[in-house]
Image (cartoon, rainbow, N blue to C red):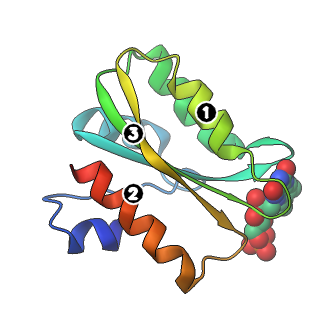
Amino acid sequence: MAEILKAKGAAKVSVADLSRDDMAEAVEDAFRMGRLVVAAASYDADVFPPMHDFLHHLKIKGYRNRRVGIIENGSWAPCAGKVMRSMLETMRDVEIVEPVVTIRSRMKRADIPALEALADAVLN
Ligand SMILES: Cc1cc2nc3c(=O)[nH]c(=O)nc-3n(C[C@H](O)[C@H](O)[C@H](O)COP(=O)(O)O)c2cc1C
């Protein structure tokens, strides 16, 4: 997604791996940047915990007034997107950018058009 956004002319793209990178830096970046795309795996009928933690940080720090794209991964019953949407919808003036993209298991070439559509909508 970062590569697609750059190819489409995004001025600056910052990527955080919430499993490994510093959470405070990721939260700081989210506030610094104008738009956000969250991408996480479904995990035990919920979202992968580092993303839950990240969105909780955004909520309690008053994240607002942004357009946010959602990418979910899942293998048998993807649900991460629904959970992320419901958390984002509690934040003031946060607009979910459609389409929400679902990737089943490993990313495939066939997933790219949906990611490009999301990138276009995010950059709009
Ligand atoms: C512990 C665990 C729980 C998972 N829970 C779900 C789930 O509730 N729904 C779902 O669709 N996929 C679930 N997945 C699948 C992941 O979202 C993801 O699609 C998958 O792990 C990617 O394939 P890989 O593990 O071979 O890289 C789970 C995976 C793991 C390891």
Looking at the rendered structure, the secondary structure element under dot 1 is helix
Task: Let me know if residue 1 appears in the view.
Answer: no
Q: Is residue 16 left or right of residue 64?
A: right
Question: Which residue: 32% across, 73% down?
Answer: 3
In what quadrant does ligand 1 lie?
A: bottom right
- Discs 2/1, front: 2
Give the Cα distance between marks 1 and 3.
17 Å
Of the residues shown, which amino acid type is indicated by label 1?
Asp
Residue designated by label 3: 68
Q: Is residue 89 above or below residue 29?
A: above
Disc 3 or disc 2, which is closer to the eye?
A: 2
Estimate the x, y position of residue 106 in percent, counting from the top left: 68, 76
Residue 6 image point, x, y percent: 23, 69
Q: Is residue 55 above or below residue 10?
A: above
- The residue to which callout 1 is attached is 53
Disc 3 marks which amino acid? Val
For mark 2, give the secondary structure: helix
Q: Residue at x 60, y 82 (%)?
A: 108
Kind of residue at disc 2: Leu
Residue that mark 2 sits on: 118
